[in-house]
Amino acid sequence: PKFIEFLRRNEFGQHIREELPEGHRVKQGTPTMGGLLILVVATVAFLAVSKYKVPALTVLLVTLACGAIGFLDDFIKLTHRRSLGLRGRWKLVLLALITVGVGFAADHQDLPTSVFIPVVHWNVELSYGWYVLIFLVIAGTVNGVNLTDGLDGLAAGTGIIALITFT
């Protein structure tokens, strides 16, 4: 609550486009950059309990890098006082760079580049296609909330289901 109050006090709120429905204007000024608090808490928790192995550090760095893209997007929205943030193509380029980093970490760990298909019991070698798969997994995961969050904030419901499942 204190962080949300800080965001409201400093007017770090969402700007709404003019062409959207009238009912959506209620969300004007809704605090943005709440993910920043989640990332800080997750990082502190990770640093407190981690054994600092390459796979765990890779997950942390991917999370922080994707969070940095979201922060940059929100920062652009706030500084330009409009609802348009970072362009989609730049988000994809940045996600591709993150994928390259994950690829290096995976190569360092000598992970196999094959995928097992359980129904037919096939082990399919993807070779360089494995990196395309990594990109699709990272981009899909990062944008999953954006796809479920619409005008009515559906991400809260799907997020609760995911958190209960993880718990």
Image (cartoon, rainbow, N blue to C red):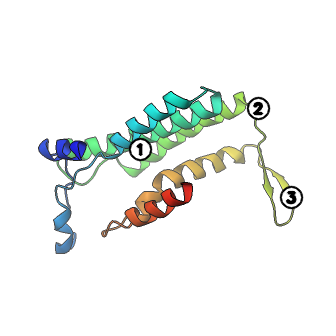
The residue depicted at 48 percent of the width and 51 percent of the height is 142
Left or right: residue 74 compared with residue 70: left
**Does residue 19 appear anywhere in the picture?**
no
The residue depicted at 45 percent of the width and 41 percent of the height is 66
Looking at the picture, tell me which residue is in the foreground, 29 or 79: 29
Disc 1: which residue: 90
Left or right: residue 62 compared with residue 110: left
Going from N to C along the chain, the mark reached first, 3 or 2, is 2
Q: Measured along the vertical axis of the image, is residue 61 above or below residue 125?
A: above
Identified by mark 1, the residue type is Trp
Mark 2: which secondary structure? loop
Identified by mark 2, the residue type is Asp
**Does residue 70 appear anywhere in the picture?**
yes
Quadrant where the image shows the C terminus: bottom right
Find the distance from the CA under tag 2 to the CA under tag 1: 30 Å
Q: Are marks 1 and 3 in contact (CB under 8 Å)?
A: no
Identified by mark 3, the residue type is Trp
Mark number for residue 71?
none
Disc 3: which residue: 122
Looking at the picture, tell me which residue is in the foreground, 25 or 127: 25
Q: Position of residue 120 (x, y in %)?
A: 86, 65
Crowd rating for badge 3 (residues with CA inside 10 Å; few <14, some 14–19, many 20+): few
Disc 2: which residue: 110
Q: Position of residue 97 (x, y in %)?
A: 52, 36
Going from N to C along the chain, the mark reached first, 1 or 3, is 1
